[in-house]
Image (cartoon, rainbow, N blue to C red):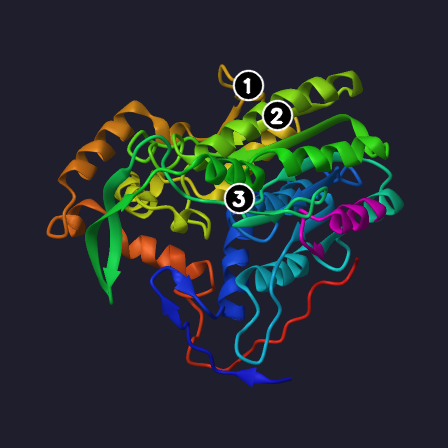
């Protein structure tokens, strides 16, 4: 066993190394934040396919499925192994720890593969068919910068840009350890950039997964599939909901309605899930989101709902323990705590007053920076970062 002493090696919000022990501790915290089963053991749990199981809401959904519901099935993620120059990715180490917590008697496997590819679909469905026969739930939580269309081979690259007109707004920046309020201006996307973003982040791949399951007869009566989306504040709307990402999210929601029609004869359902704000690797790449989230956290404090809390609420609805909380567009809403009118009014006031001089009293930038580091296993309390650590961790066996 080789031990290495590693350093974060970060530039801004991007870290080149992940800490195995810190990543494991993050998963342990998610596990503890998720309720244990409250009722008697009724035998084998439902079968779930969770695509994007190693990070963000997908990870939280996986942990909640395993911890609370004894879920069986398969999680899919696309993570980088260790090299001579760098550690494995944070998602690699988180997946390894998630599998450990599921225990030796757990019936949940993990596949490291590009979920956009036909090969991943074939391998995953072969496993599900041989092991379970049918699937009860499909959770789609994929965030990626690019996608290769399996039908054409064309590579589409997403763009984070406004639509229609330029976007200029405040941003959160760090000069060393010092948080600053800066500004950024982005030109509007051209049609090709908008269309490419829809191809990457819209519902095309989600539908391919559902179609593949139904074509092979792997959909159980009562099957329910959901895909994660976000609405957010009108403060960030020009770069998010009204921008290229928003066009992709609209396509995702339109896809949910088409899937709902397709699945209805089979007794199935399809919905998008509007989650609340969170610090994820995807969200840190979006201008203004860091500042907005820091302000929101300062306003709400412990009222800021974690991904574990949101995933717990989601599974309660998917398993029938609680009724579906649908809006007028038939989306499951988990973001009421964020979108509350009084909360939004208070965050608007903080946003208007936010400058470098006022930032310390208006935004929780220390919390935000720590949350970014935790994505890679850094800034996790109780982790000894001075001690050498085993960085070579095998991917969980099983598929």
Direction top: furthest residue = 328
Whether the residues at callouts 1 and 2 have beta carbons within 8 Å, the answer is yes
> Is residue 125 rendered magenta in the image?
yes
Q: Nearer the viewer, residue 133 or 337?
A: 133
Q: Which residue is mark 1?
A: 330
Labelled pair 1, 3 in contact (Cβ < 8 Å):
no
Q: Is residue 79 visible?
A: yes
48 relative to 378 in the view: left or right: right
**Residue 203 found in image quarter:** top right
Which badge, 3 or 2, is on the more N-terminal residue? 3
Q: Is residue 266 above or below residue 226?
A: above
Q: Residue at x 72, y 37 (%)?
A: 209
Q: Nearer the viewer, mark 3 or mark 2?
A: 2
From the viewer's perspective, is residue 173 above or below residue 156? below
* Label 2 Cα neighbours within 10 Å, binned few <14 / some 14-19 / many ≥20: many
Q: Residue at x 71, y 36 (%)?
A: 208
Nearer the N terminus, badge 1 or badge 2? 2
Label 1: state its secondary structure: loop
In the rendered image, which quarter contains the C terminus? bottom right
Q: Which residues are magenta?
A: 111-126
Q: Which mark is residue 57?
A: 3
* Mark 1 → mark 2, Cα distance in angstroms: 9 Å
Note whether residue 322 is visible.
no
């Amino acid at each position: 066993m080789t031990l290495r002493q590693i350093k974060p090696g970060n530039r801004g919000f991007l870290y080149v190394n992940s800490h195995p022990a810190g990543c494991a501790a993050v998963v342990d915290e998610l596990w503890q934040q998720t309720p244990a089963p409250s009722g008697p053991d009724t035998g084998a749990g439902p079968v779930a396919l969770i695509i994007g199981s190693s990070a963000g809401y997908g990870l939280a959904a996986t942990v909640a499925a395993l911890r609370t519901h004894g879920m069986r099935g398969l999680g899919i993620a696309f993570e980088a192994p260790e090299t001579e120059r760098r550690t494995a990715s944070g998602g690699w180490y988180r997946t390894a720890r998630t599998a450990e917590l599921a225990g030796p008697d757990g019936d949940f496997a993990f596949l490291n593969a590009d979920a956009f590819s036909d090969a991943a679909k074939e391998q995953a469905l072969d496993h599900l068919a041989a092991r379970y026969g049918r699937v009860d739930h499909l959770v789609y939580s994929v965030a990626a910068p690019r996608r290769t269309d399996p039908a054409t081979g064309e590579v589409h690259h997403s763009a984070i840009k406004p639509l229609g007109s330029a976007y200029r707004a405040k941003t959160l920046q760090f000069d060393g350890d010092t948080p600053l309020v800066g500004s950024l201006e982005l030109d509007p996307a051209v049609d090709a950039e908008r269309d490419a973003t829809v191809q990457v982040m819209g519902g095309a791949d989600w539908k391919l997964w559902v179609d593949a399951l139904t074509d092979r007869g792997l959909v159980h009566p009562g099957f329910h599939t959901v895909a994660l989306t976000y609405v957010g504040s009108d403060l960030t709307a020009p770069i998010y909901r009204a921008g290229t990402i928003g066009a992709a999210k609209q396509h995702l929601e339109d896809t949910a309605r088409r899937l709902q029609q397709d699945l209805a004869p089979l007794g199935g359902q399809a919905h998008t899930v509007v989650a609340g704000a969170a610090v994820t690797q995807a969200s840190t790449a979006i201008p203004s989101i860091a500042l907005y989230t820091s302000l929101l956290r300062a306003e709400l404090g412990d009222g800021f709902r974690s991904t574990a809390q949101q995933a717990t609420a989601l599974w309660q609805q998917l398993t029938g323990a609680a009724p579906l909380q649908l809006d007028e567009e038939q989306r499951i809403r988990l973001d009421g705590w964020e979108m509350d009118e009084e909360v939004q009014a208070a965050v608007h006031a903080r946003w208007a007053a936010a400058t470098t001089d006022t930032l310390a009293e208006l935004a929780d930038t220390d919390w935000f920076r720590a949350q970014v580091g935790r994505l890679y296993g850094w800034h996790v309390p109780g982790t000894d970062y001075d001690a050498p650590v085993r960085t070579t961790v095998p991917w969980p066996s099983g598929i």
